[in-house]
Image (spheres, coloured by chain):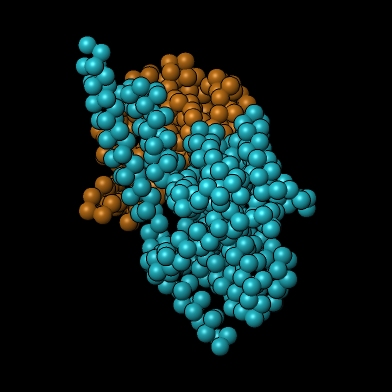
Chain colours: A cyan, B orange
Amino acid sequence: MNIAFSKHSLTQYRVFMGYRYLAYQLELKQLLLQLKSFGLLFLVVLGSSVLGLILLLFLGLGKIIDSSSAPQYGAQMALFYLLLQSVMLSAMKSAIKNSHQRLFQRTIARSVWLYLVDIKLLTLSNGWLIASVLIALDLTLSQWVKVPHFIVFMLLQFSLGVLCLYKPSALVYGFLFSTILVLVPIHMQPLTYHMSFALLFALSLFVPVVNVNGRIAVSSLFGFWFCYLLNHRWTLVWRVSLLLCVFMASAALINERADLVAILVILAMAFIVLFSSSLQFDCGRVYEQYRLFFKTCERERAFYISQFLPSILLFLVATISYSVIFGHSHSVLFVIGNMWCVLQVYLAQKKPAHYALVWIAFTAGLLALLN
Amino acid sequence: MIEVIGLNKQFSDNVVYRDYNKVFSSQKVCIDAPNGQGKTTLLMMLAGLEKPQSGTFLFAGKTAKELGKEVALATDRIALPEFLTARQIIHLSVSTLGCQWPEAVISGFNFSEFLNTRFDALSSGNQKKCQLILALMRKAPYLLLDEPSAALDQTSIQYLLYLLDFYLADKPNGQIIITCHEPAPFVEQGFECISL
């Protein structure tokens, strides 16, 4: 009787797992389709450099493992990895949890199954953790003894994935506290750093969520866009994370190859333009969605113009930050960058099919001008 | 009085209006027509939110110069920012239009307790109330309401009828046009029921 019941349950679970896996695949396909606005760009630039990106991923992991000589740098790198992982998982969260059909799932499966499949799909989706595990499997016992912090790092990778699914607010607080920790110039061992991260993220679980959204008085277009970005922070978070990537890569490369600084600055500028101007794809959609509402408020023209401001502001903040951090402020490049960003924003709005092509041509043109 | 002259409107191959002429002479008009006949589209065009291929709209015998000030429309077709609370949406409209905060209408619809709820979390009835509040607070001479009683509870319908009863008291040239599939309560309040 019991065996028959268990078999039946197992079959049910498998059917449910099959459904979730199908939903996961379908939603991921949809997610990839959304990247079509970058289509050509991803194929031409990122597509050809996938191998390089994977190598960089392992190179970074190497720095995290072997951080005894520079623990603070290693800790910063680890935190940066965790941030990128969280950004990626946040993008995939809906696919992992099959969020849109969550209530339906509850009607056909036990609660525990839902969480079990969530964790399975989360592990499957976490390429960053898989990369760490691959490296971990390659380590010998004597090497393990020297890098105990790497175990904590992998545990953090897994735990932050779970937080991303069920308690994203803790993720935000945890990153905030941990960033402060890695920026404070104190000497700590790598293990202490990683244990501190774990502690900070654990404590973040108990920090209450502050909902500022409803408390903001929206009386202008500025308030409207502010609330939009606050409620759709994902559109900014992934861009800011990638901009951080650009900044960190710049710092490392300028340090290694000071002779290539001109090329590196142009490349950094190109990516700043790319990540900031692409925000227009989102803002353009918002404009289309609420155009009629603002027309009834007699603010259609102002609303039209305002849709371009988030991209331009992001570009200005990123460019000025880059100039301040790296001390490479060049007025001509700044003006060119501004004009380029405006052009890309225009293309994102009017001719999205040409967006990627123009960006590549412009980047290649600027690099060619250097020679 | 609103007059529609020679209206032509089509969406790709779907012709909604072909050389359509109509005079809405009553002060309170209820348009009753089957789904897909273009009731909402007509209201959208009257409010200047959608453009016809050709045709003219006359308001009291003249083309409106400032449609935004003369016509107020409540319809599901105007997407409201779903990430804002009802209070923020109303506040934004009040600020941009320079109206007064519609305290009386909000409490009349028993909407006060939902002001701090995000628009996408409101029930369909409360979303409808929010649309109605936004249109009514403008006090425009021409009030166009698309399915105003849809999803509303009986108390709210009664309050809406009460408001509409007095709406034109200070607007001698004003007009209320609604679309409705259940016109009986509106007809009882003096609305003339017409087909398209």
Q: Position of residue A110 (x, y in %)?
A: 35, 22
How many numbered badges does the structure rendering display?
0
Q: Position of residue A6 (x, y in %)?
A: 26, 19
Q: Nearer the viewer, residue A98 or A353?
A: A98
Residue under the image location 78 percent in, 50 percent down: A186
Residue under the image location 43 percent in, 16 percent down: B154
- Vertical arrangement, residue A356 with respect to residue A233, above or below: below
Q: Is residue B193 visible?
A: no
Q: Quadrant of the N terminus of chain B?
A: top left
Q: Is residue B24 left or right of residue B87?
A: left
- Vertical arrangement, residue B188 with respect to residue A179, above or below: above
Q: Nearer the viewer, residue A254 or B130?
A: A254
Q: Nearer the viewer, residue B69 or A158?
A: A158
Residue under the image location 34 percent in, 27 percent down: A104
Q: Position of residue A280 (x, y in %)?
A: 51, 59
Q: Nearer the viewer, residue A324 or B172?
A: A324
Q: Quadrant of residue A27?
A: top left
Q: Quadrant of the C terminus of chain B?
A: top left
Residue under the image location 54 percent in, 81 percent down: A367
